Amino acid sequence: MSEINNQLIKQVLGIETDQEIRCDSVGLIIDHEKQNMLSFLDDQKFLADLKSSPNISAILVSKKLSSEVTSAHIKKIICDDPRYHYYTLTNYLSRQDYKERDTQIHPTAKIAPSASVATHNVEIGQNVVIEPNAVILPDVIIGNNSIIRAGSILGSEGFEHKRTTKGILSVFHDGKVIIGENVTIGANNIIDKGFSDRSTKVGDFTKCNSFAFIGHCAQIGKRCLVGVGAIITGSSTVEDDVWIGPSATISNQVKVGSGARVTMGSVVTQNVEPGRHVTGNFAVDHSNFIEFIKSIR
C-alpha cells in the first residue's frame, strides 16, 4: 500500500491540511491489528475506542466532532463527510494495489464444460472437481482434492455499501476466497470474497451442504459441517470441528468456538464458547432452551 500522506489525501479527496500526515494503513477505529492507521469518526459512540487506541495516527472527522478528539498523537483531518471520504480513499488504495495474474489450473483438475472459470486471479489445485454450471470468479484459490458442486458461485462481490451525504458508496472488494484442501462446497452455494485485508476462508476437510451462503470475510475452520441453507454472514469466524445445522444463521462478526454445535434454524447473535451447544432465535444454551420449551407446553 502507498504511504498515505498530504499529497495523496489532496489528490484523492481534495482535502488540504496543515498537519503532516504519514500513515502506513487505513482501518476502522475498532481495528487493533494494524499500526499507524488513518481512520474516520462520524459517531460519538466510538470516541472511547479512539481515545484508547495507540494505532491511529490520523482521523477523518467532522468539524462538529473534532473538538472531542483530544489525543495528542492523533492528527485531525476536518471534512464534511468522514465516512464518504474514508471509503473513497480505501477504494482508491485497493484498486491501485489490485493486480491481475493469469489463472492457474492444475492439469489433473476436472472442470465441467458448462462451468465458468475466470481467466485471471484463480488458482485451482490438484484433483479439484468443478461440476456443471459452477462459476469461479476472479480472486479464488481452491486447494487440492476439493469439490465444487453444481451451480455454486465463488468470488462474488459482498454486500458492503455505505450511506453518505453524497449517496450510497459501494466498497471495492480486493480480497479472496480461499478454499482449503479436501473441501466440499455443495450445490448452489454462494461464497463472497473478502476485502480490507481479510479474505473469506473455508478450512481443510470442511463440508458444506447445498444452498449455504458464506459472506465476505467470513472464515470457517477445519473439519466443519455446514448444513443445507445455512447462512454465515460477513466477518464471522467459525473455528474447527463446528456443526452448523440446516438453515442456521451466524450473525456478522460473531465467533463460534471449536467443537461447538448450532442447532438447525438457530440465529446466533453472540459469541459461542468452544464446545457449547446453542439453540433458538436468538440462540441460547441448548439445555436452557429445552427447559424453556418445556415450561410453556
Image (tube, helix red, strand yellow):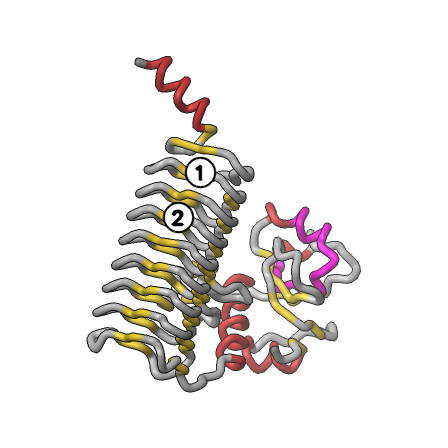
The residue pinned by badge 1 equals: 261
How far from the left and from the top, in percent, is residue 282?
41, 33
- The C terminus is located in which quarter? top left
231 to 79, vertically: above or below:
above
Task: State whether residue 166 appears in this view.
Answer: no
- Is 140 in front, or is 206? 206
Amino acid type, residue under disc 1 in the picture = Arg
Tag 2: residue type?
A: Leu
> Is 51 one of the magenta-colored residues?
yes
Residue visible at 37% across and 48% down in the picture: 226
In this view, the residue farthest toward the right is 72
Picture disc at residue 225: 2
The answer to whether residue 155 is left or right of residue 270 is left
Q: Secondary structure at mark 1?
A: strand
Q: In the rendered structure, which segment of residues is drawn in magenta?
A: 47-64
Q: Would you say the residues marked 2 and 1 are in contact, meaning their CB atoms lie under 8 Å apart?
A: no
Pick the front one: 199 or 252: 199
Specify whether residue 289 is painted magenta.
no
**Horizontal and vertical percent for residue 73?**
78, 62
In front of the other: 23 or 16? 23
Q: Determine whether the residue tagged by mark 2 lies in a helix, strand or loop.
A: strand
Label 2, label 1: how far apart the Cα atoms are: 10 Å
- Crowdedness of circle 2 by 10 Å Cα count: few (<14), some, many (20+)? many
Q: Give me the residue at 21% from left, 77% from top.
A: 113
Residue placed at 50% from the left, 44% from the top?
256
Picture quarter containing residue 104?
bottom left
User: For the point 66% across and 56% down, which residue is it?
Assistant: 32
Locate residue 83, reporting x and y percent.
52, 62
| Residue 259 falls left or right of residue 243 | right
**Residue 217 sits above or below residue 126 on the image:** above
Around disc 1, counting alpha carbons within 10 Å, would you say few (fewer than 14), some (14 to 19), or many (20 or more)? many
